[in-house]
Amino acid sequence: MFILGFAIFLICTLLTAIVLGGDWASFINLPTLLMILIPLAAVMTATKSFKVFYYGLKAMIFPEKPITEELRGQAASLFRFLSKATALVSTIGFLISIINLLMGIDYSIPDLRFAIGANIAATLLIFVYGLFLIVAVFEPVVFNLKKRRDTERK
């Protein structure tokens, strides 16, 4: 229930920022999105776990479909690992963006605040994307798989 509440909080916060800020496109930044998704795709490729990922999402979306105990355990551990990997990738992306920001400061530019603002926005979007993936995708799947396991054991 906590995860669902936090996901609703995160979505409401984003919607409020979009409504108050006016431009929804400012929350879409392709380089920062790729900075999160490419390492996760590399992890999925290295572990050859696309099938387990698919069955985990399928179990989340269609809970009435049967899934074996072994596949359920593999999917839960994969999504738990992806959640931790997303936190790590978000932190590394944050550090890369901060270094990029600090190296790009040029005091000869008259409107330095615009250059700094764009880099700070990209830095914060990395965390928003990472949190969204963790809270709205990966952790709910783990919670749902554990809940199904517990109800089937009773």
Image (cartoon, helix red, strand yellow):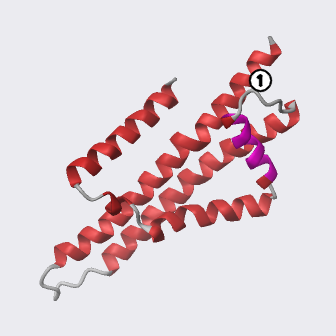
**Please, what is the dominant secondary structure of the magenta stretch?**
helix
User: Foreground residue, 77 or 136?
Assistant: 136
> In the rendered image, which residue does mark 1 sit on?
149
x then y, percent, for residue 60: 67, 35
x then y, percent, for residue 136: 52, 41
x then y, percent, for residue 21: 22, 54
x then y, percent, for residue 66: 83, 30
Residue at (81, 51) in percent of width and height: 51
Q: In this view, does 69 lie to the left or right of 114?
A: right
Residue at (32, 70) in percent of width and height: 119
The image quadrant where one finds the C terminus is: top right
Rendering quarter of residue 123 = bottom left
User: Is residue 54 covered in magenta?
Assistant: yes
User: Foreground residue, 69 or 85?
Assistant: 69
Callout 1, which amino acid?
A: Arg
Q: What stretch is highlighted in magenta?
A: 51-60
Judge whether 125 appears above or below 82 on screen: below
